[in-house]
Image (cartoon, rainbow, N blue to C red):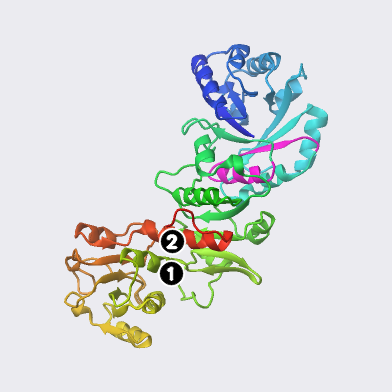
Amino acid sequence: MLCIAVTPTSRTLAKVDLLNAARRADLVELCLDHLTKDPDVGDLLAACPKPVIVSCRSTQYGGKYDGGETHRLGLLRQAIIAGPAYVELDPDAAEALPRFGETKRLVAFHSPNKPLKKIAATVDRAVKELHADAVKFTWPTPDLAAAWPLIYAVSQKLSVPVVGQGIGGGGLTFSLLARMLGSPWIYAALEQGMEDVEGQPTVEALESVYDARAIDKKTRFVAFAGFPDRGATNGDQGSACRSWNAAATAAGVPQRALPLEVGKFDHLPDMLRILKIRVAALGPALSAEAAKEWSQFAPLSLDDADGRAVPTVAMQAKDGWRGRVSSRAALIHALTATCGGSLERRQITLLGAGIGTEALARMLMDRGATLAIADPDDAAAATTAQRLNARALQWRAVYSTHTDVLIRGERGANAPAPVPLGEGPKAYNHAGLEPRLTVADATAIWAETDFLAAARTHACTITEPSAVAAAVLSRLFEKVTGEAWPGGE
């Protein structure tokens, strides 16, 4: 079930929020601690056609209520008498308030700084001493490692149902996993800006991006790390996850994208094995530390290893996790589409003489392209061209030599940064960009670069990063599901 928490500040808005939430929720949580005036709880409940959880959390337990404890307990007592489906009670309130009527008791444990230990013992105490019908745990989940105890808590078969709520960037990740693990319900905010806790996903994200209602025990996740959308919030990996989930829905396969921030990698193999995650897509927004960790966790195959490359895909193999650099093949696929479906006899100039560029060059030559290698270091360009049996182009001739396609690639070990734009002797002058050229950038294939931006101003034809990203995802989708990417690329 999906529980939408509403956090109204006025009694009038409370009724509106309850009605709006009821249209999209299976269960609604009414958070009384946000109200500025005492409500008539029975009147509010009458306005909601769905089962309601009533809560009134003090600041000690992560809420907004900062009045007297006696008054807070009075509000909760009034809520119990009004007869909602559940009343949420922290341990203090559960000790003070007896069971009454048919209202079920959701005993909530809030730990603002770290996970709680001895989950089973805590649940047993809640049942025996606090008369809990269900138990809720809330604590920080900035990443998978921190969320793991909460994932464990909701996955156990205990004497009463257990639900959880993650605080922070991993809240969405936890909620999606909780759906797969059979949690009785997960929490969502009605709208962005109305979150009950930091990191709470919105119902819009859960429904339209992740199709959360379709997630069940048969669902298998593909992890997406480092794919933020512009303006993405609450751990949302944005358009990449949206595209993957839309494709899975259209193809009718039980695959879903899981936004993932790992945190500590110490126990990642075991965590992924337990969650039955065998594939991870790795995007451009990984921190330097995370990229290093992923490279060590999923070392590149011999075909891809070039000393600096970061895998764009990590897959579980018989001998452990292995990385792949799928972006080069995807770039060529997108470039081929940009060039009308063929690179045969196309004159292509690669800027940069690095090992990664060399791997890209071999793929281009396999497609029938005629290749020239140029680098501010003429000796490096000559050495690379000789290994490839391609043409070496001296840097001073790069503007005067005819080419159809211009691709910026990686440079060598002594000059790891890509060829810069500029007017110096070791830079590429954007004046050399002409409208007749097709331009691509292999150094940052997921996003706009200064090189592509300059090419746009000169009306060049661009191999769009979005097309490259789609090619990466479509090939991964086919590999994972055995189905074609619906609707093309």
Q: Amino acid at mark 2?
A: Ala
Cα distance, mark 2 to mark 1?
8 Å
Identify residue for label 1: 329
Residue appearing at x 70%, y 47% in the figure? 152
Give the SS element for disc 2. helix
Identify residue for label 2: 471
Q: Is residue 398 left or right of residue 299?
A: left
Q: Is residue 166 above or below residue 335?
A: above
Residue 444 % position (x, y):
37, 63
> Is residue 169 inside the magenta stretch?
yes
Q: Which residues are magenta?
A: 159-182
Q: Out of 357 and 218, give the one closest to the viewer.
A: 218
Q: Is residue 199 visible?
A: no
Q: Is residue 485 visible?
A: yes
Q: For the N terminus, which image quadrant?
A: top right
Residue appearing at x 69%, y 23% in the figure? 85
Q: Residue furthest right?
A: 128
Circle 2 packing at 10 Å, graded few (<14), some (14-19), many (20+), is many
